[in-house]
Image (tube, rainbow, N blue to C red):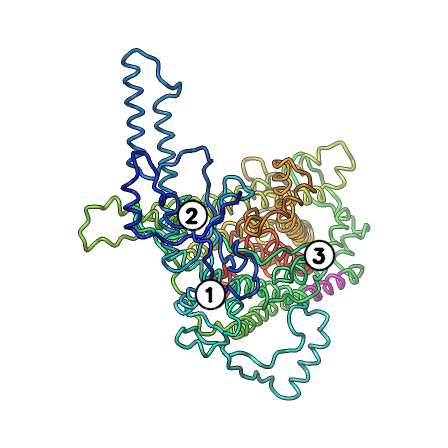
Amino acid sequence: MRRNDYYIPVSGEEKAADFGNTKDGGVSKYSKYDSIPLNSLKSDEAASSPKQGPTFQDGQRRVDYVLTYHVQKPQSVRRKTSRFADYRILRSLRRSLSTMRSGGTPPSKEDPEIAAHKHRLDYHEDDKRFRQTEFEDNLREVGLELEKDEGNKIPGIGFLKIHAPWNVLCREAEFMKLKMPTKKVYEVKQGSNVVERINLFIHKVTAPLHPKVEPNRPQNVKHLSHPFSREKQHLFDLSDRASFFDSKTRASIVYEVLKRTRCTKAKYTMGITSLLGNGVYTAAYPLHDGDVDGMGAEANDRKILYEEWASYSVFYKYQPIGLIRKYFGEKIGLYFAWLGVYTQMLIPAAIVGVIVFLYGCATVDNDIPSMEICDARNNITMCPLCDRACSYWKLKTACGTARASHLFDNPATVFFSIFMALWATMFMEHWKRRQMRLNYIWDLTGFEEEEDHHRAEYEIQVMQKTLKKQDMSPKDKKVKLTCTDRAPAYMMGLFIMLFMIGVTFAVVFGVILYRISIRAALHMSSNPTARSNIRATVKGTAAVINLVIIIIMDEVYGAVARWLTVLEVPKTDKSFEERLIIKTFVLKFANAFSPIVYLAFFRGRMVGRPGDYVYVIGSYRMEECAHAGCLMELCIQLCITMLGKQLIQNNLFEIGIPKIKKLIRRRKSDMDSQQQEDYNMTLERHEKDHFLGPFVGLSPEYMEMIIQFGMVTLFVASFPLAPLFALLNNIIEIRLDAKKFVTEVRRPIAARAKDIGTASGIIF
């Protein structure tokens, strides 16, 4: 039987009177929840409103937020006070010691110390339960309505469903200064008649590219927005209170209350972030609007996003940025808007790059340097490429490499380099214009980012520092972490980052030694096929080895960057994200671009001359560039790196890893696909979302695009097809990320933002 009760606070006098009537080891009738069930409790505005997404058991009040926690097994006995727990531990130890002294056998085969340790574990769980109960009481005091669900289909997990009534929404919206649309509307001027006609013509031509989520005709009327005020409710359209605050806004309001609500009876004050960090609650998330699959699924924003945005069949359509912002918030909306602008700007760059490549193909037969190299009549003999094992060779054997180099290194490459420099500037200005327009449409023009709440790790460190300074004077009671406290973490972070960059350089040097040694080994080979394809074998295998190392080290560097950022104990989530992005960028940039920088700027410049070659590590002679330069090898390295990273790391990992995890969960549940589907049909919305992955932020998504943008702009002269490959990857990436956000990840908290944050400074 499922337990779903509603509770109201109980006065301290009632709890004290009841506690006085309990006997030794007894439990107060108010001790489990410190509240009284009230199943008939209903919201004022929900009583007559239609069903808006997941609701409480009454079918009226919608679930705005969910907290999960561990539920002890029914047979375990719970103790509510440390006094009773300590007394039982002491009594058990005394009984065991007295029995052993009298020469008798212990009443239990269990070691008393082990039993005492188990009691301490129970006490730790009781401490969590105490904090949880106090926190929930404080939530009720601020006006939130709660419903518990401990008898669900997920064993060991309890759910606390939270609903924000109308008065709480209004109060918090005024406190947060949320801009809400008023009754007053104004007309948006479209400019002159000529401009308006051009815009209408463009809109009609591109009508098939627009998703079916908004009116196809441009809106000429806009609601005037104003910070919400309870004293000026008459200015706002409150005819439908149930939809005035959408699900995204309601979840944001509840989350602000959860972060601000404190547990003051514990050793230190803490909000939901600290409670999650201490394990009092295991997860906290808002719910998705509904299901995305099935013929009977109700029409909701999530299903519309799945059909018109997260499906590969609509890859050619524009993104519904307005609906993305409505469902996920401005921060995620800006990321997908930036990704859309970047992908659109790649179209002309890809076209020009293909033209440059085709020009090289058309003029390869007329290229004078390659014609001279391929002419057998010249009979030019070249010096050996290595000592002892290599012999003299004819220049005409490099004919194929010379002709291939012309495909990417021709007179049109100079024009393409100038074009890409101008393209990067135009992209930057175009995005700034697009960002300002979105700020106007989304009413973010007057938005100022406020200081975020403290992170759980920061509060724990402050608490530990406070406990060490209990004898402080009253003037010094305010404690915070200073640079002195973080100095060891800063020094360790700097040392480890320098060490990891050194590891990257060592790996590049190792690949250099591999090329030198494998070339000598192939020259000594008795296989004529191997000896005839030495250059292609060395270049291809070295590029593949670099790709494998880059992919492996990328994962290592991402984990190291997060670990170093955690050690620094940033104060807020925003500071944590900024530091994480910077560290990740430095490490991954060095990892991805070190082989490319070596090929572009260093290889072939430290070779020496016949009779006076440069050697490394004794007898290893530094490798030379090909007769036509190192541009061809740079092109091969860029091609394999871009294709490999995008295909394997960005797409295959994001698609394959979630499917593998899902398959493992299915194997552990001993259910086939049909049974799993039937089981999912019986779950409620909060139970389904519990099985989804947590939202880890946008840092990994931005980092993928930053590395790709660097490859497209910095070394595009050696690989004109890079914009084309980036365009094809991004078309898939947009729909892949969309599907992940809609179907595989818990709904993130909507965060307001005016720009893309630290990523903007790195890119531009």
In the rendered image, which quarter is residue 315 located in? bottom right
In the rendered image, which quarter is residue 347 located in? bottom right
Q: Secondary structure at mark 2?
A: helix
- Is residue 356 part of the magenta span, yes or no? yes
> Label 3 sits on what residue type?
Met
Label 2 to label 3: alpha-carbon separation: 37 Å
Q: Give the residue furthest to the left.
A: 473
Q: Residue at x 29, y 42 (%)?
A: 19
Q: Are marks 2 and 1 in contact (CB under 8 Å)?
A: no
Q: Give the residue furthest to the bottom.
A: 193
Q: Is residue 473 toward the left or the right of residue 88 in the image?
A: left
Q: Residue at x 68, y 81 (%)?
A: 200
Q: Nearer the viewer, residue 36 or 83?
A: 36
Q: Which residue is mark 1?
A: 44
**Mark whose residue sits in front, 2 or 3:** 3
Q: Are marks 2 and 3 in contact (CB under 8 Å)?
A: no
Residue 597 in sight here: yes
Q: Is residue 512 above or below residue 642?
A: above
Image coordinates of residue 746 in percent, x first then y, are 55, 52
Q: Nearer the viewer, residue 11 or 245?
A: 11
Q: Residue at x 60, y 86 (%)?
A: 191
Q: Give the residue furthest to the top.
A: 103
Closer to the chain start, of discs 2 and 3, is 2
Image coordinates of residue 70 in percent, x first then y, are 46, 41
Image coordinates of residue 615 in percent, x first then y, are 56, 40
Q: Magenta region: which residues?
A: 350-360
- Is residue 206 part of the magenta span, yes or no? no
Q: Are marks 3 and 1 in contact (CB under 8 Å)?
A: no
Q: Which residue is mark 2?
A: 276
Closer to the chain start, of discs 2 and 1, is 1
Q: Which residue is mark 3?
A: 295
